[in-house]
Image: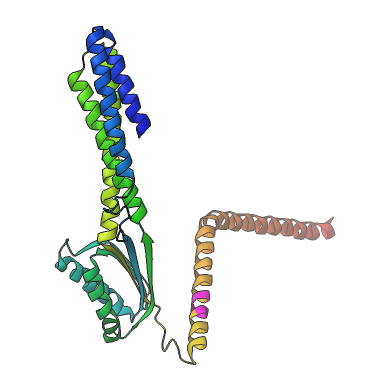
Amino acid sequence: MRKELVWAAAASVLLAGCQPAGRQQADESADVALVEAAAPADTAASAPATAAGGATPIVAPSIAYAYRFGLELPAEAATTLMAKHEQACIAAGASACQVIGSNSSRVGRDSVQASLEMRATPAYVARFRAALDGEAKGAGGRVAEQAVESEDLTRQLIDTEARMRATETLRDRLQQLLATRSGPLEQLLQVERELARVQGELDATRSALAVMRTRVQTSELDVTYRAAGQLAPDSALRPVTDALGQVAHLFMSTLAALIMVLAAALPLLLVIAPLAWLGWRRRQRAQAHRKAERMKKAEDAPSA
């Protein structure tokens, strides 16, 4: 950042090139003073504040949490419980919970897969976690999986805030140069382009900072709802039910393959079968004709 401030001072000197010598010297002195004043501010922004005694204060950690749950439920209860959780999030309001996305798929009558993605405040997540086990058992299922992931964003937040303050200082300096300087149009345009670049960088830094703060203030909450249509999944009959399910799947797969082969061969059969039948009829007629000729020759032979 000091390098950029020095560049700004150099730009101001260039802009002052066409001014009288006395005024130019005074402006250069003012630019040096401003740069020297801005540099300590930049350094202070990028370093943590110190207490009166020189000790570095303890910074509260900024941690982003992500909670993931997997529920095993009866087929009909999976989508019902997901809809209940989605409606509860919407009813809590955007300040407490937001639905990011949801989807569900069903294969046959018993196989259901659904998921719900939310972002909520720590208080809402705590209430959700406390009630989830009871809701799953009340629906005839259970919480099969649960995990908590965390990411420490403390350093990133501090660095981003420092970079934003330093960029704001540089932007203000460039704005001051444009407001107080007069010089060739090319040099003014160069400063304006640099100001536009710095402003774009500042906007991007603010957006990144807002995203990180949102991740810290709210937590990601992902819930998966599964129903495999198994009878007593943990009983001794599970291998048998699994085998029956595989047999049914294999049978239907084979039947589907046969249907595909028949569908592909049917157009050929519609063309080849008539041609084969016509060829067979022609061959039969030719054989009958030759047989008739032989019989006729055999009848004519005695008379000769």
Quadrant placement of the N terminus: top left
Residue occupying image coordinates x 21% and y 74%: 84
- Relative depth, front residue between 192 and 259: 192
Q: Position of residue 282 (x, y in %)?
A: 64, 54
Question: Magenta residues?
Answer: 246-250
- Relative depth, front residue between 119 and 172: 172
Does 107 sit left or right of 221 as displayed? right
Q: Tell me if residue 192 comes above or below residue 125 in the rendering.
A: above
Residue occupying image coordinates x 17% and y 22%: 179
Does 249 sit left or right of 28 as displayed? right
Q: Residue furthest bottom?
A: 236
Q: Tell how many labels.
A: 0
- Relative depth, front residue between 250 and 30: 30
Q: Main secondary structure of the magenta part?
A: helix
**Residue 165 seen by the camera:** yes
Q: Tell me if residue 114 comes above or below residue 203 in the rendering.
A: below
Q: Tell me if residue 302 comes above or below residue 252 in the rendering.
A: above
Here the colouring is rainbow
- Relative depth, front residue between 250 and 22: 22
Q: Position of residue 147 (x, y in %)?
A: 39, 72
